[in-house]
Amino acid sequence: MLTEIVFRHGGSIDKFIGDCVMAVWGAADNREDHAERAVEAAGDMIRFLETANVGWQQKYGLEVRLGIGVNSGTAVVGNIGSDKRMEFTAIGDTVNVAARLEAIAAPNQVLLSEDTAQLAGELFETRLLGERKLPGRSSPTRVHELLI
């Protein structure tokens, strides 16, 4: 279902990494509203889980929770690898920051970088959580939470 949400908002699935879905916006079509689309998709994922978890709790006795990290910026996108193994993907600091935001997100929390929060504009309600030291980064990152 999460892949369908990504597609509905004009994103692409880059890959599945364990229990993570890596999705990208703006790589194939360079749309101006890529950040808005990514944030809206993240919110829809959380709303879907809130609804689906009611039935899953009743039927299976479990809930699915996820943390989401969204970052915006420049990345290297294309066929990356060697003649033995090639993969279409996105790499770079922008991708790394999104992954680190996802890693520190609490269950059912969407964390946005400062760049994404500014690009998404006033369409979404966010709360500035302050600066966080993310692994592999020399300077702190301003982190916002999407209020759903």
Image (cartoon, rainbow, N blue to C red):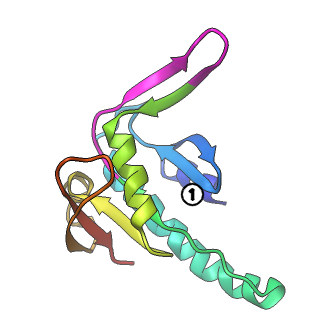
* Of residues 32 and 113, the one drawn nearer to the viewer in this rendering: 113
Residue at the spot x=45%, y=61% of the render? 103
Count residues near mark 1 (Cα–Cα under 10 Å), then give few for <14, some for 14-19, many for 20+: some
Mark 1: which amino acid?
Answer: Ile
Residue 55 visible in the snapshot: yes
Residue 23 position in % (x across, y down): 51, 46
On screen, residue 72 versus residue 17, left or right, reads left
On screen, residue 68 versus residue 85, left or right, reads left
Magenta stretch: give its range. Answer: 71-87
Q: Which residue is mark 1?
A: 5
Residue at the spot x=37%, y=59% of the render? 101
The image quarter containing residue 117 is: bottom left
The residue lying furthest to the right in this view is: 59
Residue 11 visible in the snapshot: no
Residue at the spot x=31%, y=61% of the render? 112
What kind of element bears circle 1?
helix
